[in-house]
Amino acid sequence: MKQQILIIGAGFGGVWSALSAARLLDQHDRNDVEITVLAPQAELRIRPRFYEPNVHNMKAPLNDLFDAVGVKFVQGSAETIDEKNKQVGYSNVAGVQGTLSYDRLVLAAGSQLMRPPVQGLEHAFDVDTIEAATELEAHINALKDQPASAARNTVVVIGGGFTGIETATEMPTRLRAVLGENANIRVVVIERGAKIGAALGEGISPSIVEASEHMGLEWIVGATAASVDAGGVTLADGQRIEASTVIWTVGFRASPLTEQVQGARDHQGRLHVDQHLKVRGHADVYATGDTAYAATDDKGNFAAMSCQHAIALGRYAGNNVAAELLGVEPMVYSQPKYVTCLDLGSWGAVYTEGWEREVKLVKQEAKELKSQINSIWIYPPAADRAAALAAADPSIPVA
C-alpha cells in the first residue's frame, strides 16, 4: 500500500508543496508514495490581484499541471483533522461527507480576512476571496445606474495596510471607468495608525503620501469605524461619511483548521513550526504558507502572510514531508531576502528591499516590476513535467 502525503489547500503554499514533494519523489524514482491535494477548486486563485478589475480572470487551472506531475486532486472542503487516526474529514460540492487518510499531513489552508463584531459590517465589501471581489466589481459597475450623488461617487476603504492601500489607489481609475472621466470621485482611507502608511514603515510612507496626493485620496488617521450601514460609515469619534461603497480590509488570520492542531500560535493564529516546517510537538503534521509561523533567518524575522513567502514555504514543506517518508535529509527553511512591491494606482508603485523596507524603485519603474510580479512571477508553471518539477526546487530564490 502506498504511503500518503495529504495537502490541505491549493493556494500558493499548497500548490508548491505538491510540486516540491513530487520533485523529490521523482529524483529518487519512487512511486510508492501518493500525493493528494484537497481543496474546494482545482485552481490557484491569484489573491494578491483581487484589488484589480476583471477579478474573475485572476485564477490559474491546476488539473493539467497536477496530472503532469502525478498529483491527485480531491475536490472538497476540509472540516476536521483527526490526528489520532490520521484522517481528514471533508465535504464535497454536493455536501457529501468523506475522509482521506494520510501518513503525513501538510496544512496549507491559507488565511482569511477577519470580520470583527463592528455594527453593520455586513454592509461592507472586501477583496479577500474571488467571490467577494467579484461582488464588489459588480457593485462598482452598477453605480452608473444610481442617481448621481456625492455618496454614489464616494468609496471608503477601512484599513490602511497593504491590501487597503492597493485597493484604495486603484479605485479612482475604476470609478472613472464607470462614472466618466469628469466624475467628482472621492476615495477615503480610514487608518487606525497615527500616520499615512504607518503599518508599512518610515521608508515607504513618503511614496504613499505622494501617490495619495497625486490621485486625490483622503486619509483619516488615528481613526476606527464604529458602524457601517447601507449609506456609509460612522467613525468612533462620531464623524459620518456618506458612501455607497465601503470596503473592509483590516486584519487577517490563519485558517480555522489550525485550531484543530494543538500547539503554540502567533497573534494571527499561525502554528509555530520548526526549521523543517513541521508543527512543533507533532510527528506527522507540517504547516506552510499563511498557516505557518516560520523563522526566515537567524535575525528574528518571520515569514509574512504573502505569496512571496508562501511559495518558498511550500517548496520547503513539500520537499521535507517527502524526504521524511523517503528517509533522506530534509532541508532547513531559509528565506533571508525580503522585498515589497506596493501598487499605487496611476501614480505607479514603490519597490523596497529588506525588512526595513529600503526604497529601491518608485513610480513607473516599480510599476513595471509590479506588473511582472502580478502577471508572471506568481503564477504556477505550465503543465510540463520536467519544467514544473525543476521550478519546485527549494533552493530557487523567490524574491
Image (tube, rainbow, N blue to C red):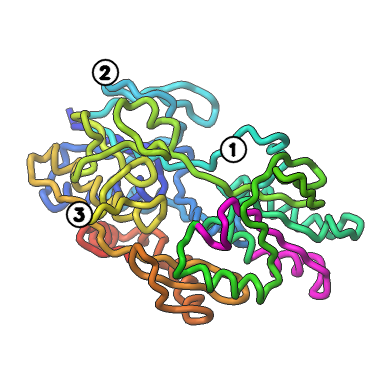
Question: Is residue 347 found left or right of 357 in the rendered image?
Answer: right
Q: Which quarter shows the N terminus?
A: top left
Residue at 45 percent across and 45 percent down: it is: 42
Residue at 82 percent across and 51 percent down: it is: 242
Q: Residue 348 appears in which quarter of the rendering?
A: bottom right
Q: Which residue is mark 2?
A: 85
Does the magenta portion include 177?
Answer: yes
Which type of secondary structure does the marked residue at label 3 adopt?
loop
Q: Which quarter shows the C terminus?
A: bottom left
How far apart are the two marked residues, 1 and 3, measured between alpha carbons?
34 Å
Is there any visible trace of residue 56 in the rendered image?
no
Looking at the rendering, the stretch of residues picked out in magenta corresponds to 170-198
Q: Position of residue 235 (x, y in %)?
A: 72, 46
Q: Are marks 1 and 3 in contact (CB under 8 Å)?
A: no
Q: Which residue is mark 1?
A: 115
Q: Which residue is mark 3?
A: 298
How far apart are the two marked residues, 2 and 1, measured between alpha carbons?
33 Å
Question: Is residue 234 found left or right of 326 in the rendered image?
Answer: right
Q: Position of residue 136 (x, y in %)?
A: 69, 51
Q: Residue 308 appears in which quarter of the rendering?
A: bottom left
N-term mark: 3 or 2: 2
Point out the frontmost of discs 2 and 1.
1
Question: Is residue 243 found left or right of 372 in the rendered image?
Answer: right
Question: 350 or 316: which is nearer to us?
Answer: 350
How crowded pointer 3 is (Cα within 10 Å; few <14, some 14-19, many 20+) is rated as few
N-term mark: 2 or 1: 2
